[in-house]
Image: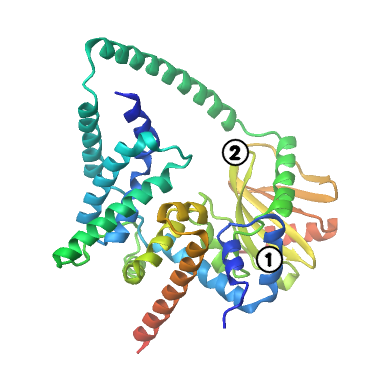
Amino acid sequence: MDDHRQRFEALALPHIDAAYNLARWLSRSPADADDVVQEAMLRAFRAFDGFRGEDVRPWLLAIVRNCWRSRAADVRRRAHAPLPAEDDRPLAFDGPDPEAEAARASDRRRLDLLIAELPEDFREVLILREMEDMSYREIAAATGAPIGTVMSRLARARGLLKELWLARDRDAVR
Amino acid sequence: MPCAKMPSTQAYLDGEVDGADAAASERHIADCPECQAFCADAADLSDAIRTTVPRYAAPAQLKLRVRQALAAEDHARSAPPVAARRAIRRSFWRGTLSGAGAMALAASLAAVAILPPSADSLADQVMDAHTRALMRGPLIQVASSDHHTVKPWFAGRIALSPPVKDLADQGFKLTGGRLDKVAGAPAAVLVYQHGRHRLDLFVWADRGSSLPTTVVRHGYRAMYWKSGDLDFAAVSDVAAPELASFVQLVRAEPE
């Protein structure tokens, strides 16, 4: 195996889960996420010789994001956006208590949907911060936005999510 | 009208600031109800996301397809002539050997890490972790006086569930928690406030090491004990009787 590929498999491939999670939350569709990640990994592989930074993950996620954006633009041009998939969410929990299980499942579905409803700019910084534990600097590198913008988007995302959350609670009470 | 310090409060909450800035944020948050509410909401949200929203992993099929695509791309890039192919084979073996060497090294490192630390080194490590946090921060990664907020924050971040007690009525106010390390192993740290003094309660998984009892160094005092399969250390600059009564409360009260 040549050096280039060995290096890529050692440094970039371990981040494929992060790449998939981001693609999945951006596209809200497993099929699109598959295609986006496959294309992004190949693009990253081709561009890897030119990669001089220290941190592969933000660099790779920036490519994932660009792949998604150009794909989304194509889809819009063809003017039939796929509906977000509802039914194939992973079962991340295994507990013996069916009641708690059901409560958790409905809670999960709810927060899931609320996050999916966020505008894309806000959704992506939230995912990168809360699920990938990335620093502001890394998020800025992945999204191409200045750190100040990352901070204000994150604050907006949190604020919006809280509003949506409270609105849901009120609806549930009514 | 949101507090003008909200951005720095958020940065503090996200672990983006340390040292004097972190201390300034902590002082501000202590006096600002709006920033306190923001911290509580953000911590709740963060907990809810981490515990109830899936982080999707790439399906095995996709990983396989990506590897295949990389291999195909690789072959397309370079169909090496015979001499080069021989060189590749040599470098493959060299790689394997250095791989074995690396494995042996990793094994010996692991053996060192698995050995339980001595009582002396534990005493030093806990003191160091406490003073390091005081000087450089972050002292608190989850800011809350509610043990129902602090306890779940540790779930998913560390493989142990520290007993979190609200001892405000006894004069020790829970202010939050953070992750730290003791002798290379992850530790949950609960941060309490007593008057103007900080108390750190370190909790880590017992590895059979003998613990020191009480250690005094540079004005700081630490008390150690075991409970079940957990090791505890309470560290602070409070007077000896206060630290002792804190330890008594932590050990005695039901959770």
Q: Assign a secondary structure to mark 2.
A: loop
Image quarter hosting the N terminus of chain B: bottom right
In the picture provided, is B115 more to the left or to the right than B55?
A: right
Q: Which mark is residue B16?
A: none
Mark 2 vs mark 1: in front: 1
Image quadrant in which you'd find residue B49? bottom left
Residue at image location 46% in from the left, 72% down from the top: A156
Where residue B56 appears, as percent x and y from the top left, is 32, 54
Q: Dot 1, crowdedness within 10 Å: few (<14), some or many (≥20)? A: some
Q: Height in image: B146 above or below B127?
A: below
* Residue on which the image places disc 2: B207
The chain that hosts pointer 1 is B
Q: Quadrant of residue B201?
A: bottom right
Quadrant containing the C terminus of chain B in the rendered view: bottom right
Residue extending farthest to the bottom is A174
- Dividing the picture into quadrants, the one containing residue B189 is bottom right
What residue is drawn where x is 62% and y is 37%? Answer: B208
B203 on left or right of A171: right
Whether residue A60 is situated above or below residue B50 in the rendered picture:
above
Identify the coloring: rainbow
Amino acid type, mark 1 = Glu
Q: In the displayed structure, does residue A166 sit left or right of residue A31? A: right
Q: Residue at x 84, y 55 (%)?
A: B240
Q: Is residue B149 visible?
A: yes
Tags 2 and 1 touching, CB below 8 Å: no
In-front residue for pair B229/A84: A84
Secondary structure under tag 1 reads: helix
Q: Residue at x 38, y 36 (%)?
A: A50
- Number of on-image labels: 2
Instruction: Where is residue B176? Give x, y as percent.
Output: 63, 63
Q: Nearer the viewer, residue A123 or B187?
A: A123
Disc 1 target residue? B26
